[in-house]
Image (cartoon, helix red, strand yellow):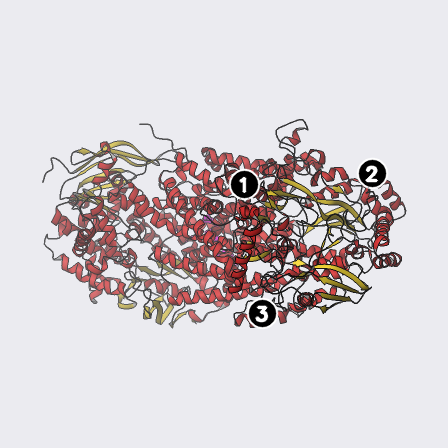
């Protein structure tokens, strides 16, 4: 390995973002390098500035408001900031390429993927027209898009999430770059798809010998990919070194906290937070719940029925936590919305406190709405940005007049805020002034305000950083024991529920494929799908042997996913 | 087809033979005339409507008689002479050798047809209105003589006949037309939403006009009409606003037959009090107001212009005397007249140039002498409700802006409508006055004239049913190419035959 | 555990007047625009007291007096109109009507149109369809005809003119509001409110309306200009405000005949209209820049760190 | 998609019918035309005759029934002023307006897109400020004022253009100019605004990461995505133009439908009012549907 001259060397880079107040230091004196053929992972949570440094390398920072205070980026012996605009442009896409977290947003919605890939060739004088098209088709095939000849003329929104990311990758590797920068490439994806994408990246790297800089907040992903790791926090590097060493004995306190927050590893079985009280009487009884959508697929094609929820039955006992696990499009969220009467079911019943939820009207319904609360995936989206925290939390009392007299509200808000680990003075602030974790706490406080018996958490922690995830789950478990709550905990991420849910239901395409106590699900999964989910969880790179027949598998999988997207399901 | 070509040939030869000068200018003499508004239609029965008459009258269609601008007396046109057989019957001799533009012969039958077409009620005929409610029956005595009977005495029938446009017997009798065929020196060639084009009619019975082709266009903006003549895009525009009449070379003022006035609703207190009505007249700074209408404007003391039979030059107009006005109002107030009631001054949008400004000015002046006058400007149709009977019940005390156009030579077209109890615009109800009017209408000659004069004098001095403002001045802009002067008839007709071209 | 993490921005929402003022001073154009508007508004409010009845004082002997001379007093500095009334005075008095009418029209159409749009967007019932058809009808209903009908049936008055202008602008607000609602009602916090048992009224008024309002306000700024212009167009056709009342638009319309001979009669009111609408457009641009977090920095101080 | 068009069309037809009904009764509120069609000194009988002749003596609902009956036979009534079929009159005038509107809107949109995106490419630059200011200024002046001044300057002053009327290409210049000013001004703002936000969107980052050239990023990617709102606004402006550029038409003596409508309204020529509105409304609804379809063309994500 040519340790001597790394392909990219970043030296003491410092970047600010300017505004009316003191400039915000996004990256502070960061230095790192990456060699040909190796994988460098930049690990950090949101706001750690992990992607700013690479954006600087790609010259994607607008100045102003950005402001590069100091530092150099030397690529293949050339100081990038010295190059003129044209030369600089010519490096992007040809020698350094980049893929992003949310391909749907990062692909131009109004052009076919073919055209967007073709552009790379054209703008770097590497062929155009038919030639470019042929090459593009070849690329699409390589990244595992089936029937590339026809799908090259599809628009981004016609692909599933995983496929979009593959398209992005195809675009990036078009000119065999020396460096591929991947910014959170799998964050928005289901575990199984994530595995495929990671495999693909590994394979490509092996073929082209390019250097891979991967930015992620996900420790498993990091462990699965990294040769070397640098850990960033609040804009500066707190730890760097070979992946294996960093993960096996972290030096810096922050790194330790991250790794301890990992929801699994066999440690989880020991330190689980499941309900201690053995489950009490039945609180909610769901029977043969079915939700059918009529979807008009495509511009001209006729309508067809699509079952989002297919004959689902289960029960929730007082004080217990039921985990519903499934990938996107499995219908898990539909169940939540139906149970909350946000959507009406096609058939089936749900008995809560002796009454069928779906037949409730007027007063009983209001009581139900008060007894059952929901915590949504995106706490920011689930709060009115124009309301301050006090208004948000006290809204249930405005709706259900009888809960609390108006004069008691102020104190109660303070109580609730403290209960969820915030400060009473936060009551006057607005949602956008809080971090993601704090917002979720506010959402929980709001849910508690109406003194519910059952809280439905729909992906309640998925959007949060690992360390924050752990904190929130901590809080939920804690509240359960203190207030005797029950939870329906919906997530796409198996490990998260592992040490929180008492029972787990695994859903696939609207059906429950497996159900059972958490420990059994993890130790002895019966259904093939459950097994594949568990298998999909990334394993640390240094534990896996080098050979693996990955390509076929990913193709096979995408073939399967393709079916679903083609006939217009809600996949991706 | 064959026939017309003969015509063309014949006339060509004719010209070649006896008009070498005509030959010289035979090279097409075309002119463009820009009118203020588009003629809605070209129905010959609507020639008293300005924008129709200005195109058709004496150009395409000709009446039996025409009015002499100076004397206001009827002159021969298609009728050569006329005699009153008895009070209700007139006999007319018709001109010989006249052909319609479609080749048909002009004769008694044609006249009968035209008159019946007017009075038949199958089409909307504006012109017939000039006859009031008279019932006309016309009979052919011989091929070139007709007798016209009326159900009541018609002393000025020959004058009235100037609105009877004679059309070809082939014209549709029971529907209005846009392709009139008459005996005039020009025939209609095109009528589009943008232009009307007239071509010289070779078979014309009278003197050949110099002009061979006339194109009419229309622009609502006075300044643009003026600009068009200035830039030579047009040769003539019959009316421009005073402020545009800035070039003495091309712009001519003419006393058009219009008289502006304010009608006082004599039925409504406080306007039923004579002193108030006088005060209204005295309170206006007439010289100042005249500024709005130009130096050539003529102060009016009566509702008809000079040259109309019955106009009295001796009758002097109200003067400006605010003190007197105040005094009169105080007296009236002293006698318990409710002088402080709000008086509605009803104006009409675009009634004449600077009309709105004039109303604003007058309102201010009346307010100055302590009358509570409030101006409302209305759209035409709305304004008409107040002008014509039956008046709106809830109208209250009101003054009405109006403009009266009498270009028919005789005060009979004015006095009854304004001053007789039955008059369509009249707010008066004075049987004695009615008798006087009826008597006057019956008389003829000198007696008629004097009778009318006395009526106007009475209206001005004793009745004070209105506030005569001005005899209006029209301004035309005539391009240097043309030799033409407007006169009192210009509002109703622009005979192309009278337009000469400067070489 | 409960530290506000550094990545959270400070609030630049409503109620931070000083910040806005700072932004204003950074955009000279916007500042000028604001200044202009301020002047006009002040003129509209206090001007009439200042000039008294000068606006209606006849001066038939000094018709069309040329501007830029003090010999008849400062009030005649901008010249006199066709009745010799001081144009300056009329501008000031006219400002009241002009801005008043426009404001009233815009406000009421924003209110009604917005409300209808909220309903049409949130509910799927028959009446929301009715509302949409209504919008279509109004949209293709010639404003001139409306003006005439109102003039004739209700008579000429400022209030009626406001009605005409307001109705003709209705669809814009209605459609915008509806479009926004269609997007907002799918938002998570609306679902949240529903799951808590909030009724339609509460959701529309408390949750949706406040978020629709800003975009309506942005439109209204430009619409204000449009209304002033269409009001003057109505005057041009004689269907607008009727004497003795007058607006800038009416002044331009009356003065148009004199553009060749006494340009100032139509020029000054024309200029006033232009400056007003211009300022409004500039300000609304400025407001849009601030509202957009991606663009806001353009108006910020951007103090760099010491090297 | 076809079903969508069908649905829209049926809605539109509903609206048109509603519109016509409304107009029918409202216009009848504005007074009796006979006063306007007969000379002021016409007698009562004459008026009665006129009313009878044109069926104005019937009770209103009866007249409406008649109107509908004729409508079904595609008879749109006679123009009182012009003695001919009202629809004929309307259809004669409409193309004239359509030509103006079409040229004006395409021209202003094209120019606005060019100027607007150039301005957005360098926000705050001199060009940006000048472009915005100039375009706004143009959009802020009363159009009749601009029109008359233009005539006085170009036709009377320099004598390089005809004052008004139709005919040569020169006759088009000033009407188009006046009609273009305001749409141009507004559209420049829209283009600039949407371009600015488009330029900060993720896919532009991708384009830069791909190393595309600047003008390709601006005109190829950002602009293409900014077109939708532009189309919306342009559509609204087009609507108002189709409804008749009354002022311009009457000043320049352009025989368009706007002028026709205002004349008909003032003259209470009801049949013509109805016909013109029927024509313009239909055009407007077609326009709206066309715009919706254009959306689908511009943005593949939109399907009906």
Find disc 2 in the rendering and name its residue. Answer: B321
Residue B132 point in image, percent of width and height = 76, 62
Residue D67's tag is: 3
Residue depicted at x 60% and y 52%? B208
Q: Is residue C108 visible?
A: no
The correct choice, above or below, for C254 with respect to C68 in the image is below
Query: In the rendered image, which residue does mark 1 sit on?
Result: B231
Disc on res. A360:
none
Task: Give the extent of the magenta segment.
Answer: A377-405
Q: How far apart are marks 3 and 1 (CA)?
A: 47 Å
Q: Tag 1's secondary structure?
A: loop
Dot 1 and dot 2 residues touching (CB under 8 Å): no
Q: In this view, does B482 lie above or below A348?
A: above
Assign the magenta stretch its main secondary structure. Answer: loop
Element type where label 2 sits in the image:
loop
Q: Position of residue C62 (x, y in %)?
A: 69, 33
Observer able to see residue A134: yes
Task: Work out how far the residue at label 1 is from the one at label 2, CA to CA, in angstroms.
Answer: 46 Å
Give the mark nearer the N terminus: 1 vs 2: 1
Front position in the image: B214 or A299: B214
Q: Few, some or many C-alpha atoms within 10 Å of disc 1 (few <14, some 14-19, many ≥20)?
A: some
Give the chain of mark 3. D
User: Label 2: chain?
Assistant: B
Quadrant showing the N terminus of chain C:
top left
- Residue C203 vertical position relative to residue D193 in the rendered view, above or below: below
| Chain at numbered mark 1 | B
Q: Is-magenta flag for residue A378?
A: yes
Share a chain, discs 2 and 3?
no
Q: Badge 2, how many Cα within 10 Å: few under 14, some, many 20+?
A: some
Task: State the residue at coordinates (15%, 50%).
Answer: A204
């Amino acid at each position: 390995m040519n340790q001597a001259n790394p392909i990219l060397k970043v030296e003491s880079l410092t970047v600010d973002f300017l505004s009316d107040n003191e400039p915000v230091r996004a990256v502070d004196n960061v230095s790192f390098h990456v060699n040909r053929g190796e994988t460098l992972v930049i690990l950090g949570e949101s706001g750690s500035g992990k992607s700013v440094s690479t954006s600087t390398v790609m010259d994607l920072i607008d100045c102003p408001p950005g402001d590069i205070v100091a530092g150099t980026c030397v690529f293949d012996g050339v100081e990038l900031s010295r190059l003129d605009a044209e030369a600089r442009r010519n490096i992007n896409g040809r020698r350094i390429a980049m893929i992003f977290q949310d391909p749907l947003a990062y692909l131009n919605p109004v052009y076919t993927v073919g055209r967007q890939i073709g552009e790379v060739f054209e703008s770097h004088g590497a062929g155009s027209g038919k030639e470019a098209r042929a090459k593009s088709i070849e690329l699409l095939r390589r990244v595992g898009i089936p029937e590339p000849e026809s799908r090259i003329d599809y628009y981004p929104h016609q692909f599933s999430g995983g496929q979009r990311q593959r398209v992005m990758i195809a675009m990036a590797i078009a000119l065999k770059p020396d460096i591929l920068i991947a910014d959170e490439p799998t964050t928005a994806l289901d575990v199984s798809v994530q595995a495929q994408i990671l495999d693909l990246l590994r394979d490509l790297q092996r073929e082209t010998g390019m250097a891979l800089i991967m930015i992620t907040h996900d420790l498993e992903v990091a462990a699965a990919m990294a040769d070397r790791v640098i850990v960033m926090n609040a804009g500066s590097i707190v730890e760097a070194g070979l992946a294996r060493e960093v993960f096996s004995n972290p030096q810096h306190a922050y790194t330790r906290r991250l790794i301890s927050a990992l929801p699994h590893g066999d440690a989880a079985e020991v330190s689980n937070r499941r309900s201690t009280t053995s489950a009490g009487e039945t609180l909610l009884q769901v029977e043969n719940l079915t939700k059918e959508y009529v979807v008009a697929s495509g511009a001209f094609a006729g309508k067809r029925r699509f079952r989002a929820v297919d004959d689902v039955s289960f029960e929730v006992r007082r004080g217990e936590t039921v985990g519903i696990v499934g990938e996107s499009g499995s219908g898990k969220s539909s169940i939540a919305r139906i149970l909350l009467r946000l959507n009406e079911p096609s058939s089936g019943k749900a008995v809560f406190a002796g009454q069928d939820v779906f037949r409730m009207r007027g007063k009983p319904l209001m009581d139900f709405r008060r007894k059952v609360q929901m915590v949504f995936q995106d706490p920011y989206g689930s709060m009115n940005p124009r309301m301050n925290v006090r208004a948000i939390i006290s809204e249930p009392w405005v709706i259900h007049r009888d809960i609390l007299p108006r004069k008691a509200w102020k104190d109660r808000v303070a109580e609730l805020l403290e209960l969820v680990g915030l400060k009473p003075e936060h009551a006057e602030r607005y949602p956008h002034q809080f971090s993601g974790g704090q917002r979720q706490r506010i959402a929980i406080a709001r849910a508690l305000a109406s003194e519910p018996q059952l809280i439905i958490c729909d992906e309640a922690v998925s959007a949060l950083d690992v360390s924050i995830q752990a904190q929130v789950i901590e809080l939920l478990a804690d509240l359960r024991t203190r207030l005797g709550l029950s939870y329906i905990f919906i997530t796409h991420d198996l490990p998260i529920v592992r040490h929180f849910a008492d029972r787990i239901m695994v859903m696939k395409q609207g059906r429950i494929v497996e159900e059972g106590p958490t420990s059994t699900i993890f130790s002895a999964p019966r259904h093939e799908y459950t097994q594949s989910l568990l298998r999909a969880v990334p394993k640390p790179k240094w534990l896996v042997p080098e050979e693996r027949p990955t390509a076929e598998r990913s193709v096979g999988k995408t073939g399967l996913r393709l079916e679903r997207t083609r006939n217009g399901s809600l996949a991706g | 087809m064959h026939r017309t070509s003969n015509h063309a040939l014949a006339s060509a030869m004719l010209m070649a033979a006896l008009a070498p000068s005509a030959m010289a200018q035979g090279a097409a003499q075309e002119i463009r005339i820009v009118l203020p508004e588009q003629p809605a239609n070209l129905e010959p029965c609507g020639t008293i409507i300005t924008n129709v008459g200005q195109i058709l009258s004496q150009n395409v269609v000709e009446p039996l008689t025409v009015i002499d601008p100076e004397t206001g007396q009827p002159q021969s046109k298609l009728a050569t002479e006329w005699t009153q057989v008895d009070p209700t019957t007139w006999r007319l001799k018709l001109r010989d050798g006249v052909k319609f533009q479609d080749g048909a012969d002009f004769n008694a039958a044609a006249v009968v047809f035209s008159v019946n077409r007017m009075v038949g009620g199958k089409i909307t005929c504006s012109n017939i209105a000039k006859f009031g409610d008279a019932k006309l029956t016309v009979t052919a005595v011989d091929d070139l003589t007709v007798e016209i009977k009326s159900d009541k005495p018609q002393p000025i029938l020959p004058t009235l006949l100037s609105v009877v446009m004679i059309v070809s017997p082939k014209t549709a009798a029971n529907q209005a037309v846009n392709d009139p065929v008459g005996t005039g020196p020009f025939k209609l060639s095109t009528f589009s939403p943008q232009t009307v084009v007239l071509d010289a009619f070779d078979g014309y019975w009278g003197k050949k006009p110099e002009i061979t082709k006339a194109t009419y266009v229309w622009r609502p903006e006075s300044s643009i009409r003026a600009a068009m003549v200035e830039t030579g895009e047009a040769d003539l525009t019959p009316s421009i606003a005073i402020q545009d009449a800035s070039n003495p070379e091309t712009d001519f003022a003419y006393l058009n037959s219009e008289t502006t006035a304010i009608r006082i609703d004599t039925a409504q207190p406080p306007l039923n009090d004579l002193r108030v009505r006088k005060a209204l007249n005295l309170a206006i700074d007439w010289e100042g107001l005249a500024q709005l209408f130009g130096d050539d404007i003529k102060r009016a003391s009566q509702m008809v212009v000079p040259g109309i039979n019955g106009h009295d030059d001796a009758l002097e107009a109200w003067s400006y005397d605010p003190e007197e006005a105040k005094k009169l109002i105080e007296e009236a107030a002293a006698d318990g007249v409710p002088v402080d009631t709000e008086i509605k001054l009803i104006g009409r949008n675009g009634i004449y140039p600077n009309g709105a400004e004039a109303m604003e000015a007058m309102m201010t002046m009346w307010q100055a002498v302590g009358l509570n006058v409030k101006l409302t400007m209305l759209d035409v149709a709305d304004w008409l409700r107040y002008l014509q009977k039956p008046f709106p019940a809830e109208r209250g005390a009101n003054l009405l802006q109006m403009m009266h156009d009498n270009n028919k030579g005789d005060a009979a077209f004015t006095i009854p409508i304004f001053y007789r109890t039955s008059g369509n615009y009249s707010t008066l109800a004075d049987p004695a006055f009615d008798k006087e009017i009826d008597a006057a209408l019956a008389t003829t000659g000198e007696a008629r004239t004097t009778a009318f004069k006395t009526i106007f004098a009475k209206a001005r001095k004793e009745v004070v049913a209105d506030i005569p403002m001005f005899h209006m001045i029209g301004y035309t802009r005539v391009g240097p190419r043309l030799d033409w002067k407007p006169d009192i008839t210009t509002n109703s007709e622009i005979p192309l035959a009278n337009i000469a071209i400067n070489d | 555990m409960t530290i506000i993490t550094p990545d959270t921005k400070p609030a630049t929402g409503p109620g931070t007047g000083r910040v806005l003022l700072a932004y204003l001073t950074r955009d000279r154009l916007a500042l000028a625009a604001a200044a202009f508007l301020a002047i006009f508004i002040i003129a509209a409010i206090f001007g009439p007291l200042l000039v008294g009845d000068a606006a209606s004082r006849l001066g038939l002997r000094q018709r069309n007096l040329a501007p830029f001379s003090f010999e008849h007093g400062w009030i005649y500095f901008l010249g006199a109109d066709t009745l010799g009334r001081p144009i300056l005075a009329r501008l000031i008095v006219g400002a009241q009507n002009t801005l008043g009418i426009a404001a009233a029209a815009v406000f009421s159409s924003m209110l009604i149109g917005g409300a209808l749009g909220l309903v049409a967007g949130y509910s799927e019932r028959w009446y929301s369809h009715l509302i949409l058809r209504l919008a279509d009808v109004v949209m293709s209903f010639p404003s001139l005809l409306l003006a005439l009908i109102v003039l004739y049936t209700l008579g000429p008055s400022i209030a009626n003119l406001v009605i005409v202008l307001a109705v003709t602008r209705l669809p814009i607000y209605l459609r915008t509001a509806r479009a926004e609602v269609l997007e907002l009602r799918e938002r998570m916090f609306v679902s949240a409110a529903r799951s808590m048992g909030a009724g339609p009224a509460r959701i529309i008024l408390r949750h949706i309306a406040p978020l629709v309002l800003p975009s309506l306000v942005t439109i209204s700024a430009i619409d204000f200009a449009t209304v002033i212009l269409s009001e003057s167009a109505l005057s041009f056709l004689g269907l607008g405000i009727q004497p003795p009342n007058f607006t800038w638009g009416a002044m331009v319309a009356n003065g148009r005949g004199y553009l060749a001979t006494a340009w100032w009669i139509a020029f000054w009111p024309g200029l006033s209209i232009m400056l007003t609408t211009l300022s409004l457009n500039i300000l609304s641009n400025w407001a849009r820049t601030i509202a957009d977090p991606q663009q806001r920095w353009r108006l910020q101080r951007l103090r760099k760190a010491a090297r | 998609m076809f079903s969508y068009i069908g649905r829209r069309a049926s809605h539109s037809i509903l609206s048109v019918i509603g519109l016509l009904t409304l107009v029918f009764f409202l216009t009848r509120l504005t007074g009796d035309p006979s006063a306007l069609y007969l000379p002021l000194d016409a007698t009562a009988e004459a008026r009665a005759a006129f009313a009878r002749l044109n069926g104005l003596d019937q009770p209103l609902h009866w007249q409406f029934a008649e109107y509908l009956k004729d409508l079904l036979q595609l008879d749109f009534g006679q123009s009182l002023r012009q003695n001919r079929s009202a629809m004929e009159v309307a259809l004669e005038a409409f193309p004239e307006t359509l030509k103006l509107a079409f040229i004006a809107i395409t021209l202003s949109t094209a120019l606005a897109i060019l100027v607007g995106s150039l301005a957005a490419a360098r926000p705050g630059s001199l060009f940006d400020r000048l472009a915005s200011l100039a375009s706004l200024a143009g959009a802020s002046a009363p159009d009749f004022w601009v029109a008359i001044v233009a005539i006085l300057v170009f036709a009377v002053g320099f004598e390089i253009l005809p004052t008004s009327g139709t005919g040569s290409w020169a006759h088009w210049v000033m009407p188009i100019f006046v009609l273009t000013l305001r749409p141009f001004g507004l559209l420049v703002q829209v283009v600039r605004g949407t371009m600015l936000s488009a330029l900060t969107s993720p896919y532009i980052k991708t384009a830069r990461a791909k190393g595309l050239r600047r003008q390709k990023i601006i005109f190829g990617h950002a602009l293409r995505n900014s077109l939708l709102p532009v189309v919306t606004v342009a559509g609204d402006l087009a609507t108002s133009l189709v409804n008749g550029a009354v002022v311009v038409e009457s000043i320049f003596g352009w025989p368009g439908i706007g002028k026709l409508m205002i004349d008909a309204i003032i003259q209470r020529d009801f049949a013509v009012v109805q016909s013109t509105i029927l024509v313009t409304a239909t055009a407007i609804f077609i326009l709206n549907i066309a715009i919706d379809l254009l959306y689908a063309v511009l943005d593949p994500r939109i399907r009906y």
